Image: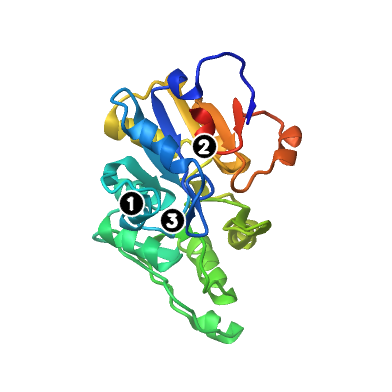
Amino acid sequence: MIRAMAGSMRIIDRYCTFLVDCDGVLWTRGKAIPGAAEAIKSLVSSPSKRVIFVTNNCGRTIPSIQGDLASLLGFGDIPAADIVTSGTATAAYLRSKMDVSREKVYLIAQEAFSETLTEYGIPHFGLGPLPFRTGTEWATHQLDPSVKYVVVSLDRDFSHGKLTAAYLYIAENGAEYLAPDVDRFFSAGERKIPGTHSLQAGLTSLVEREPRVLGKPSSFIMDMLERERGPIARTATLMIGDSYETDMKFGFNCGVATALVLTGNAKKGDVAGFERKPDYVLDNISGIL
């Protein structure tokens, strides 16, 4: 374990609120990361500690994450209110802005995100493959005038057709462009593979504007938590994650302490190149104990 802050006090004793990422911190490829169950047990069993699980994986529903917390780590009683995904953050934003009786979302995403929007009562469409259309067909294609939001996240059915539809809804309908996350890479064992940002980059260049980001590293989730739960003491809060670009920058943007674990995206050799160093760099999450 590398510690960026000196002192004999354990990390867990320095903070009251813990924002904990899931993939790459608690589990990876369907298996619990060593030390994760012990660390979470110490947190959830302490009446003076508050734990909120914050993930950028909008391809997971809250019940599915609760299932992993139960089956992989042994915690079957984590309340849904203590889990936030970039999908639920996006759904909350849309619910606060939309006239659901008149407006719709064009959604580029996986099925779980669609389920989340449905749960929040957000009208949307776009799931599944979109057949190829020629230029002639697009020239006469009728856009749905009720689409006022375009949401782009990871979609295994992403295509030129979906890119074209998203572009037209923004360029012609004036739809707001939203991103649950802008992750550049996902971890695939020892490899990194393209993340959501690779799908958004083409659309961003076409519409010549950046999307409004609602997941990490944007501070929107922290602001949402405070609106729902009341003030969070930032100086007594620690963000624990495996990604510098999302988790650590989220912590920086929110004014909270940061702990980078080396069990996911970030590797030990990456740390020297970081413009701003996390407060702690840990071999795994059990380093807080």
Q: Position of residue 175 (x, y in %)?
A: 45, 58
Is 215 on the left-hand or right-hand side of 261?
left
Q: Which residue is the site of mark 3? A: 58
Q: Quadrant of residue 60?
A: bottom left
Task: From the viewer's side, name the closer residue of 253 and 47.
Answer: 47
- Residue drawn at the location 33% of the way across and 59% of the way down: 117
Q: The residue under label 2 is which amino acid type?
A: Ile
Q: The residue under label 1 is which amino acid type?
A: Ala
Circles 1 and 3 in contact, beta carbons < 8 Å? no
- Residue drawn at the location 48% of the way across and 56% of the way down: 31
CA gap between label 3 and label 2 equals 22 Å
* Mark 1 element type: helix
Q: The residue under label 3 is which amino acid type?
A: Cys
Q: Which residue is the site of mark 1? A: 70
Question: How dense is the environment of label 3, judged by Cα within 10 Å: few (below 14), some, or many (20 and up)?
Answer: many
Report the quarter where the N terminus lies.
top right
Q: Mark 3 or mark 2, which has the lower sequence index?
A: 3
Q: Is residue 156 above or below residue 3?
A: below
Q: Position of residue 70 (x, y in %)?
A: 33, 51
- Residue drawn at the location 42% of the way across and 42% of the way down: 37
- Between label 1 and label 3, give the one nearer the viewer: 1
Q: Mark 2 or mark 1, which has the lower sequence index?
A: 1
Q: Which residue is the site of mark 2? A: 285
Is 89 on the left-hand or right-hand side of 121?
right
- Residue drawn at the location 60% of the way across and 25% of the way down: 279
